Image: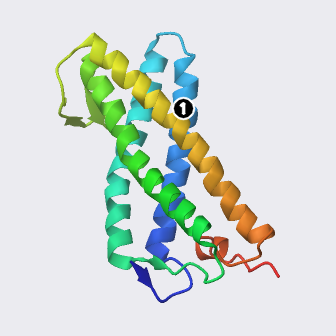
Amino acid sequence: MSKTRDSYGGIQIGLHWLMALIIIAAWIVGQVMGDMHLSPTKFKVISYHKWAGITVLILAFLRVACRVGMGAPAEPASLPTWQRIAAAATHHLLYLLMFLIPLTGWLMSSAKGIPVVYFGVLPLPDFIAKDESLAHFFKETHEMLNNGLVVLLLAHVGAALKHHYIDRDDILTRMVPGLKRRT
């Protein structure tokens, strides 16, 4: 759904950048905790990682609702069809990963028999019973999806910068308040 406006709304922009920060932080924490030795500190770091993941999952629902309700600015008429298709595919995959990555992490915790307790106060239900082979499967899936996310994010950022600095169009200015069009 497209609305006749030049940029995303403030809520959409805020959610975009908040989620970007949380996702990047969660990814970094995930990389760090993978190299940590088993200790009370590692368990705290794992909890922070889970809290970030559940927050991303909650915000993803809100973000989809905003996208459906508020739409998005129309693409520039000069945008080639292949770029429209690539942009739509990338955005759809990014949204999908915002759901799948936290869910596979949650499933991995359930399969390991380790509960997810949101912010240390709200115990979330286990989706599946403890099962080491499923835990391994969801761990591998979680890592693979995260690797795919990194590739998509690099493509997303690269495309936005290309549009701003090479094509000199308004694509990036729609999501970055105060950024002026490159002429």
The secondary structure type at the circle numbered 1 is: helix
Residue depicted at x 19% and y 31%: 127
Q: How is the image coloured?
A: rainbow
Residue 45 is situated, as x and y percent measured from the top left of the image, at: 47, 27
Residue depicted at x 42% and y 45%: 97
Q: Rate crowding at label 1 as few (under 14), some (14 to 19) or many (20 or more) other CA atoms within 10 Å.
A: some
Residue depicted at x 73% and y 62%: 161
Q: Residue furthest bottom?
A: 4
In the rendered image, the vertical position of residue 135 relative to residue 24, given as above or below: above
**What residue is shown with label 1?**
29
Question: Residue 175 sits in which quadrant?
Answer: bottom right
- Residue nearest the observer in this picture, 115 or 81: 81
Mark yes or no: residue 2 visible: yes
Quarter the C terminus occupies:
bottom right
Quarter the N terminus occupies:
bottom left
Residue 64 is situated, as x and y percent measured from the top left of the image, at: 35, 63
Residue 165 is situated, as x and y percent measured from the top left of the image, at: 80, 68
In the displayed structure image, the side of residue 31 where residue 91 appears, left or right? left
In the rendered image, the vertical position of residue 100 relative to residue 66, given as above or below: above
Residue depicted at x 24% and y 17%: 113
Mark yes or no: residue 119 visible: no
In the rendered image, the vertical position of residue 103 relative to residue 92, given as above or below: above
In the displayed structure image, the side of residue 132 where residue 94 appears, left or right? right
- Residue nearest the observer in this picture, 144 or 118: 144
Residue 89 is situated, as x and y percent measured from the top left of the image, at: 49, 57
In the rendered image, the vertical position of residue 75 relative to residue 25, given as above or below: below
- Residue nearest the observer in this picture, 181 or 28: 181
- Residue nearest the observer in this picture, 86 or 131: 86
Question: Residue 180 sits in which quadrant?
Answer: bottom right
